[in-house]
Image (cartoon, rainbow, N blue to C red):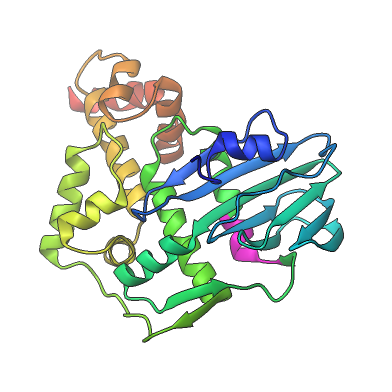
């Protein structure tokens, strides 16, 4: 059966032609899902009923709008919603929405099984449920995560698994801390990577510049869980694994640009960029200029 985190299922439920979705496989049971739900007109009819499941969705408003909600058959009106308003829905409670104005929403999905698995692997206290004190309360962290995901969702073909994994782990940490009813011992406070762990991680990244490595793969190299590894890597290097990967791709591209007349499209493929446009956009962010201009400016000093 199709999961409620899948793009087609969500598009049909909210009467949308497209519902672009990214999935993070930071848990083995079900993915953490991120979906953009956008309509320039609003919905003519309420969203279709959701399959009851032990899972939660967070809807973060990106535009002002208004909606009617039904939870377990009880009506809740939300006539004025501002950007950043966050709605937590327990998908076992039969939530139904009717957003009758234009809307732009980032939907986050996580199952109870994923919450349990990640808590175990990260040494966290287990969140037996997620509860919000008020529907539509403004959550600055969730709004920030939603905004960070927008470009990635619309450019899903670009290789950004490390970035999406990082957002998924940040989402998990935030919702369990903010909305979780937790049990068990306190969280283990992680430290930094040991020298051998850092070397393993950066060597794996260097060997996979033309691929799309995941945080889980890097964590395995170090004998750590995904969440512990991600935090320890950032504390050790000052950047996230995704930022490290992009920087190394750009550095590799600079080496190739100085070697000769290799075409930019070929450099892009060798260094793990989807195409020349993707390569040029990322390169310019790091170098302050296009790859072609950078090569013209720097080639003379390496002859």
Whole-percent x, y for residue 249 in the image? 29, 36
Between 248 and 182, the residue placed more toward the observer is: 182
Answer yes or no: is residue 110 visible.
yes
**Residue lying at the far right of the rendered structure:** 79
The answer to whether 78 appears left or right of 211 in the picture is right
Dominant secondary structure, magenta: helix
Image: 45 above or below 171: above
Q: Report the residue at 86% width, 43% height from top.
A: 101
Give x and y (percent) for residue 2. 50, 40
Q: Which residue does the image show at 80% across and 44% down from the upper left?
A: 46
Question: Does 11 sit left or right of 255 as displayed?
Answer: right
User: Residue 230: where, in percent of width, then height?
Assistant: 32, 61
> How far across and how far down the image is residue 104, in percent?
72, 44
The reply to whether residue 20 is in sight is: no
Q: Quadrant of the C terminus?
A: top left
Whether residue 143 is in magenta: the answer is yes
Image-quadrant location for residue 150: top right
Question: Residue 103, located in which quarter of the rendered image?
Answer: top right
Figure disc tally: 0
- Name the residue: 53% across, 45% down: 5
Residue found 31% across the figure and 80% down from its top: 188
Residue at the extreme bottom: 185
Q: Give the range drawn in magenta.
A: 138-145
Q: Does the magenta stretch include residue 196?
A: no
Q: Nearer the viewer, residue 69 or 191?
A: 69
Q: Left or right: 224 with respect to 81?
A: left
């Amino acid at each position: 059966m199709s999961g409620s985190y899948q793009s087609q299922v969500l598009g049909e439920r909210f009467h949308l032609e497209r519902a672009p979705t990214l999935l993070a496989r930071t848990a083995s049971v079900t993915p953490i899902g991120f979906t953009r739900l956008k309509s320039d007109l609003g919905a003519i009819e309420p969203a279709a009923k959701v399959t009851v499941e032990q899972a939660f969705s967070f809807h973060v408003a990106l535009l002002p709008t208004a909606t009617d909600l039904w939870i377990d058959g009880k009506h809740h009106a939300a006539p004025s919603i501002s950007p950043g308003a966050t709605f937590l829905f327990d998908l076992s409670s039969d939530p139904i929405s009717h957003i009758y104005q234009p809307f732009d929403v980032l939907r986050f999905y996580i199952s109870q099984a994923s919450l349990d698995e990640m808590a175990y692997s990260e040494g966290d206290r287990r969140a037996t449920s997620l509860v919000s004190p008020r529907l539509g309360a403004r959550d600055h962290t969730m709004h920030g995560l939603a905004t960070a995901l927008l470009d990635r969702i619309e450019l899903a073909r670009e290789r950004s698994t490390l970035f999406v994994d990082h957002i998924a782990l940040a989402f998990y940490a935030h919702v369990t801390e903010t909305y979780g009813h937790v049990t068990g011992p306190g969280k283990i406070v992680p430290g930094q990577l040991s020298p051998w762990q850092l070397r393993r991680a950066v060597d794996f990244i260097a060997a996979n510049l033309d691929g799309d490595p995941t945080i889980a793969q890097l964590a395995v190299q170090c004998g750590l869980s995904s969440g512990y590894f991600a935090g320890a890597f950032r504390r050790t290097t000052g950047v996230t694994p995704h930022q490290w990967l992009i920087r190394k791709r750009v550095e590799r591209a600079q080496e190739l640009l100085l070697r000769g007349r290799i075409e930019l499209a070929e450099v892009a493929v060798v260094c793990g960029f989807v195409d020349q446009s993707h390569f040029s956009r990322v390169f310019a962010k790091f170098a302050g200029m296009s790859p072609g201009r950078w090569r013209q400016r720097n080639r003379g000093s390496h002859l």
